[in-house]
């Protein structure tokens, strides 16, 4: 296959899903033993759940945040950070963890928010860093409203989706990692990548793709991502 030399500084757009974080020990929504087991979505991940039982929702995300803080970036996260030293890389992630940033990646867009921050219940544009893993009931924003996890719930708009679509249109190379392409609108981002742009997909179980022009690397992220990065950097 033809690979681009790093000196050209091509724009690489990377879309990551739950599969890349699963290898750091963070369970995924769609796994049989996944993160949400024992909870209905309606109980912990909707605006209605927050209005009905905010303490339960807060505790649920506190536990998720604790798991995120205990997790460590894996070889795939570090390989993408290395790629960012040689190319103009933007990572668009569906994940709510901060493992990309902790590995050293600088340009990261979180489609669904990031669990290490809180947001105002009244104004979602007001966000704050969280010190530690616990966000308590009674902690208020500057407007006097309860703070909640900075996470996009089911039924809420995805505020960064238009910006992500615009960025995908600028790709010279596109890489999809660890996503089943089952969650919209994020799954639709592949449709904004220009025709003719090299597209790679890395996943141990390649999902159905609307386009057949992906270069398939049927490996888990910790194997496939370092391999591809090595090719792009040294090819």
Image (cartoon, rainbow, N blue to C red):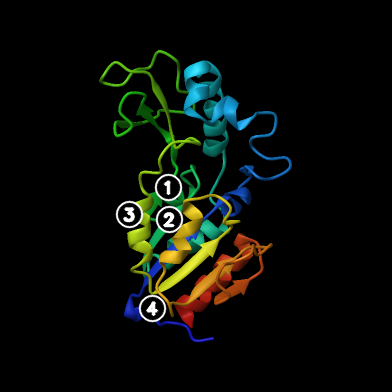
> Which residue is at 48% across, 36% downward?
155
Q: Which residue is mark 3?
A: 163
Nearest-to-viewer mark from 3 and 2:
3
Query: Marks 3 and 2, how far apart in space?
Result: 10 Å
| Direction right: furthest residue | 32
Q: Which mark is residue 92?
A: 2
Residue 114 in picture, x, y percent from top left: 43, 40
Which numbered disc, 3 or 2, marks the residue that appears first in the sequence? 2
Where 13 sits versus 154, above or below? below
Q: Residue furthest top?
A: 138
Q: Earlier in the sequence, mark 2 or mark 1?
A: 2
Question: If you read the primary sequence from the N terminus, does the residue marked by circle 3 or circle 4 appear first?
Answer: 4
Q: Earlier in the sequence, mark 2 or mark 4?
A: 4
Q: Quadrant of residue 202?
A: bottom right
Q: CA distance from mark 1 to mark 4?
A: 28 Å
- Left or right: where does residue 186 sit relative to residue 164? right
Q: Which residue is mark 4?
A: 6
Q: Earlier in the sequence, mark 1 or mark 4?
A: 4
**Mark 2 near mark 4, Cβ–Cβ under 8 Å?**
no
Q: Residues within 10 Å of mark 4 (few under 14, many from 20)?
A: some
Q: How far across and how far down the image is residue 108, in percent?
A: 39, 53
- Classify mark 4: helix, strand or loop: helix
Q: Which mark is residue 111?
A: 1
Image marks 3 and 2: residues in contact by CB distance under 8 Å: no
**Looking at the image, residue 134 lies above or below residue 32:** above
Which label's residue is closer to the chain start, 1 or 3? 1
Callout 3: few (<14), some (14-19), or many (20+) C-alpha neighbours within 10 Å?
Answer: few
Determine the CA span between mark 3 and mark 4: 25 Å
Residue 20 is situated, as x and y percent measured from the top left of the image, at 57, 54
Looking at the image, do the residues carrying marks 2 and 1 touch, with CB atoms under 8 Å apart?
A: yes
Q: Nearer the viewer, residue 153 or 99?
A: 153
């Amino acid at each position: 296959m033809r690979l681009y030399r790093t000196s050209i500084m091509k724009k690489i757009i990377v879309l990551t899903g739950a599969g890349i974080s699963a290898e750091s020990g963070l369970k995924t929504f769609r796994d049989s033993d996944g993160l949400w087991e024992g909870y209905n979505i309606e109980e912990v991940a909707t605006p209605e759940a927050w209005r009905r039982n905010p303490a339960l929702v807060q505790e649920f995300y506190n536990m998720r945040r604790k798991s995120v803080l205990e997790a460590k970036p894996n070889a795939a996260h570090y390989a993408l950070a290395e790629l960012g030293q040689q190319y103009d890389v933007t990572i668009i992630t569906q994940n709510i963890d901060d493992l990309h940033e902790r590995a050293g990646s600088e340009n990261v867009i979180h489609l669904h928010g990031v669990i290490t921050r809180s947001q105002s219940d009244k104004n979602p544009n007001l966000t704050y860093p969280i010190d530690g893993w616990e966000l308590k009931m009674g902690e208020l924003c500057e407007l006097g409203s309860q703070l909640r996890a900075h996470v996009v719930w089911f039924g809420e708009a995805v505020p960064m989706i238009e910006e992500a679509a615009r960025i995908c249109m600028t790709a010279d190379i596109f890489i999809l990692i660890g996503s089943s392409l089952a969650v919209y609108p994020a799954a639709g981002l592949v449709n904004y990548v220009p025709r003719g742009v090299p597209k790679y997909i890395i996943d141990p179980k390649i999902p159905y793709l609307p386009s057949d022009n992906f270069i398939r690397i049927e490996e888990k992220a910790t194997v496939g991502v370092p391999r591809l990065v090595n090719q792009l950097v040294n090819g």
